[in-house]
C-alpha cells in the first residue's frame, strides 16, 4: 500500500527553540557534578510551586509516583477506595493500586470528559477515602462542585493534573481545590522533561515535609529510615531542563490555546464533533474530536498527510490489569474510548499547518 508523506506529524519531541538553552542547562549540571537532590531541584520546586499557585512542590520520578506518594502521604492505602476517572492514562489507576488502595470509577460527562459531582456521588461507599478527578486533555473537571461534595462527605480531594500544567478552573489554579495535585513531566506533556519526571504540589507544609521523606527512602536524616519510603527523586539534569522550559510554559500555553481557538473556528459545523470548552483555563494538552467512524476518519487524515492518535482506545474499566480490581459500569467512558481522536496540537504548530489539519478534517465524508 502506498503510504502518503506526512505533512503534519502528531508531535515531534526533538527540542526546538529551546535546544541551546537545554544543552547549556545540562552542561551546567555536568560541570557542577551534583546529580541528585541538589540546587537545580530546589530551585525548580520553588519555581514550579510559584507558577502553579501552590505553596510547595516536591519533585519525584514520574507522574505515577506523584499520585501514589500523594495518596500515601495522606494516609490512604489498603482498605481504602479512591474514586477516579475511567477515561485516562492507565497510570492514574495503577498509581492508586501502587498506594495499596482500590480505584473506583465514576463515569465521565460525555462533553467534558471528566468525572462529575453526580457520578462521583453515586460511587461513594463507606470505604471511600478520596476523590481524584483527572483534568483530561488539559480541561479541568468541575472542581468547585466536586470540592463541595468531598467536604460534605469528609473525603480527601486530590487532583491528577498530569495533563493540566498552569490550568485554572473558575479562575483558581488546578491543585488548589484539595490536599494536593500530581503532575507529570513525561516528554509529551505540556511541560516535558527529556526523560521521566513528576511533581506534587500542595499548600500543606506538613504534607510537603512528609512527601520529601517518602520520596527519599523514608529518611528523616541521612541513614535514619523512620518509615517505609521509596526512591523517587527528580534528578538534577531533568530539574535543570524543566527550569528552562518552565520559563517558556506560559507562552507555550497561550500558543496551545490560540491554535485550539483556530481549530474551533475552522471545524464548526464540520463532520466530526468538537467537544465544548467548559473553562477558559483549559490548557489543551490535547485537542480531541469525536466521531463514530474513527477508523475511517483516521485513514482519511493519514491520506491527507495528517497523523492522529487516540487517547485512549480503551476505558480503564476495559483494561484486564485494572478491571479485576475495580469492576465498574461506565458506559460514557466506553463510548468515548471508541470515538475520541486527537489532532496535532503543539506550541510550534504553525497556523499554516493547523489549516492543513482543519482542511483535512473538513473534507472527511462520513459514510451514511
Ligand atoms: C501521563 C499521565 C500520568 C502518568 O504520568 P507519568 O509521568 O507517565 O508516570 C498519569 N495520569 C495522567 C492523566 C497522565 O496523562
Image (cartoon, rainbow, N blue to C red):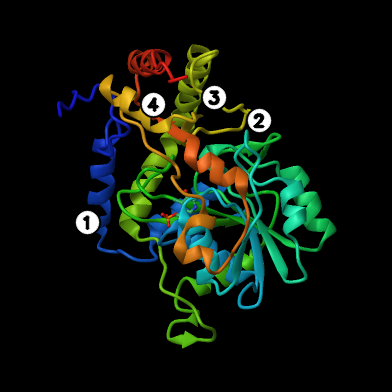
Question: Mark 1 sits on what residue?
Answer: 31
Q: Residue at x 39, y 59 (%)?
A: 39
Question: Mark 4 sits on what residue?
Answer: 297
In the image, taking residue 153 as reference, residue 24 lies left or right, namely: left
Camera-nearest residue between 131 and 306: 306
Query: What distance separates the C-alpha of mark 4 from that of mark 2?
Result: 25 Å
Q: Is mark 1 within 8 Å of ligand 1?
A: no
- Whole-percent x, y for residue 18 in the image: 30, 35
Query: What distance separates the C-alpha of mark 3 from that of mark 2?
Result: 12 Å
SS of the residue under disc 3: loop
Residues tagged 3 and 2 counted as in contact (Cβ below 8 A): no
- Quadrant containing the N terminus is top left
Query: What distance separates the C-alpha of mark 1 from that of mark 2?
Result: 47 Å
N-term-proximal mark, 4 vs 1: 1
N-term-proximal mark, 4 vs 3: 3
Query: What distance separates the C-alpha of mark 3 from that of mark 1?
Result: 49 Å
User: Viewer-nearest of labels 3 and 1?
Assistant: 3
Establish if 26 lies above or below 139.
Answer: below
Residue 330 seen from this side? yes
As drawn, the label of residue 278 is: 2
- Whole-percent x, y for residue 185 in the image: 41, 50
Camera-nearest residue between 56 and 60: 60
Q: Residue at x 54, y 86 (%)?
A: 226
Question: Mark 3 sits on what residue?
Answer: 274
Crowd around label 2: few <14 · some 14–19 · many ≥20 (10 Å): some
User: Viewer-nearest of labels 4 and 2?
Assistant: 4
Amino acid at each position: 500500500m502506498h503510504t502518503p508523506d506526512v505533512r503534519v506529524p502528531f508531535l515531534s519531541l526533538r527540542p526546538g527553540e529551546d535546544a541551546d538553552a537545554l544543552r547549556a542547562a545540562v552542561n551546567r549540571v555536568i560541570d557542577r557534578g551534583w546529580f541528585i537532590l541538589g540546587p537545580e531541584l530546589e530551585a525548580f520546586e520553588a519555581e514550579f510551586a510559584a507558577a502553579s499557585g501552590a505553596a510547595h512542590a516536591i519533585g519525584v520520578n514520574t507522574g505515577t509516583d506523584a499520585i501514589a506518594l500523594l495518596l500515601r502521604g495522606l494516609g490512604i492505602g489498603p482498605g481504602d477506595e479512591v474514586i477516579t476517572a475511567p477515561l485516562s492514562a492507565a497510570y492514574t489507576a495503577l498509581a492508586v493500586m501502587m498506594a495499596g488502595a482500590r480505584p473506583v470509577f465514576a463515569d465521565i460527562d460525555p462533553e467534558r470528559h471528566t468525572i462529575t459531582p453526580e457520578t462521583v456521588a453515586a460511587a461513594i461507599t463507606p470505604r471511600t477515602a478520596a476523590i481524584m478527578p483527572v483534568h483530561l486533555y488539559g480541561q479541568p473537571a468541575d472542581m468547585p462542585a466536586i470540592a463541595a461534595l468531598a467536604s460534605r462527605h469528609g473525603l480527601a480531594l486530590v487532583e491528577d493534573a498530569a495533563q493540566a500544567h498552569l490550568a485554572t478552573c473558575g479562575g483558581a489554579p488546578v491543585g488548589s481545590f484539595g490536599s494536593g495535585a500530581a503532575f507529570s513531566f513525561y516528554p509529551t506533556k505540556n511541560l516535558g522533561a527529556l526523560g521521566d519526571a513528576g511533581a506534587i504540589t500542595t499548600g500543606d507544609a506538613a504534607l510537603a515535609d512528609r512527601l520529601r521523606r517518602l520520596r527519599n527512602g523514608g529518611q528523616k536524616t541521612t541513614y535514619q529510615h523512620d518509615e517505609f519510603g521509596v526512591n523517587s527523586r527528580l534528578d538534577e539534569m531533568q530539574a535543570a531542563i524543566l527550569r528552562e522550559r518552565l520559563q517558556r510554559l506560559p507562552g507555550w500555553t497561550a500558543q496551545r490555546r490560540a491554535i485550539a481557538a483556530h481549530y474551533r473556528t475552522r471545524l464548526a459545523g464540520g463532520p466530526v464533533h468538537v467537544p465544548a470548552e467548559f473553562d477558559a483555563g483549559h490548557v489543551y494538552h490535547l485537542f480531541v474530536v469525536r466521531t463514530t467512524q474513527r477508523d475511517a476518519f483516521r485513514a482519511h487524515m493519514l491520506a491527507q498527510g495528517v497523523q492522529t492518535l487516540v487517547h485512549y482506545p480503551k476505558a480503564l474499566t476495559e483494561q484486564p490489569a485494572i478491571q479485576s480490581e475495580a469492576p465498574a459500569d461506565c458506559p460514557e467512558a466506553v463510548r468515548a474510548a471508541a470515538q475520541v481522536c486527537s489532532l496535532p496540537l503543539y506550541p510550534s504548530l504553525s497556523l499554516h499547518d493547523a489549516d492543513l489539519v482543519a482542511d483535512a478534517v473538513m473534507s472527511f465524508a462520513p459514510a451514511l
